[in-house]
Image (spheres, grey):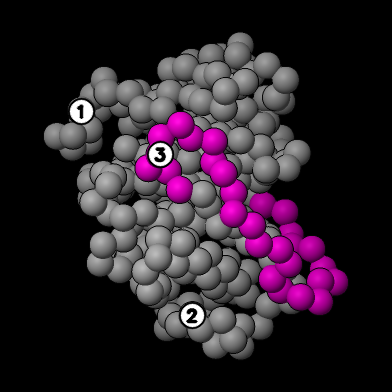
Amino acid sequence: MHDDPFDDAEEIRSNIPSAAPKDGQAVMLRTTQWLDLGHDDPRMPPAFVIAFSVAAFTTSAFEQHGVPFPATLQKAVPKRQAEFLMGRLAARHAIEHLGVAAAAPGIGTSREPLWQTGVTGSITHTKDMAGAIAVDSSTVHGIGIDIENVVDADARRALEALAITAEERALLEARREHLSVDAILTIAFSAKESFFKGTFGTVGRYFDFSAARVTSLHVNSGRLTLTLEEDLAPALPKGRSFTVCFRMLTLDTVVTSFVW
């Protein structure tokens, strides 16, 4: 599994098309909000979420917002630069929410976010939205968040081929309630992304979507269960199950979150 904080290394997501950014936006940073992720677990903080316009982005925005412009992004397309900036800006707000002086996370050797001492968190972004959560690192093993646009028919086929098994799809379709097939498949994909982010620090390597299988779904409570299909680490043995929470941000955008 690969995800937003891991930047261009995400081979799987490159097979899932995204819509082009909206044109004609005069202001890059459109709205900000603190989002309750719906967890009963008190360790899960609210997420800081930014809606932004790629069309209004210029590289001067890095200096304007006080976020370092990495050399590795100097030749990236504006969309990639804007997503990185907004993700790091969201992360800085999430860290400040802890009551500590915040710095924008750096970039690790696997392109994962490097959080300041005493803090861990997660960053996510889509074509026009970025979000982040941060917690005291002594209170959790790991934490993850993921925002996704609901897939269309073409992207659904790529997702099913790479991330969701036939058995998982059957379970998801049987229990999707009022949600569309595309929405529930996106939720399952996103849940695996959040799980990957929250466990990467423990596992220390990339692992496939097949490492965790969807074994239950409760749409009305916004919960699904992932069960490990292989040993990932001593604390993450085959057969261990975890809850991932989800909610729809809009009719075509989902957010998932995970803490352990």
Q: Nearer the viewer, residue 96 or 175?
A: 96
Kind of residue indicated by mark 3: Pro
Q: Nearer the viewer, residue 43 or 1?
A: 43
Task: Provide the major secondary structure of the magenta segment.
Answer: loop
Kind of residue indicated by mark 2: Val
Look at the numbered disc 1 and give the secondary structure of its residue.
loop
Q: Identify which residue is drawn at 31% across, 60% down.
A: 119
Q: Which mark is residue 42?
A: 3
Above or below 36: residue 125: below
Q: Nearer the viewer, mark 1 or mark 3?
A: 3
Number of labels in the image equals 3
Q: Which residue is mark 1?
A: 237
Horizontal and vertical percent position of residue 132: 49, 57
Q: Nearer the viewer, mark 3 or mark 2?
A: 3
**Magenta stretch?**
18-45
Assess whether residue 21 is covered by the magenta stretch. yes
Q: Nearer the viewer, residue 220 or 254?
A: 220
Horizontal and vertical percent position of residue 35: 59, 49
Mark 1 vs mark 3, CA separation in Å: 25 Å
Q: Nearer the viewer, mark 2 or mark 1?
A: 2
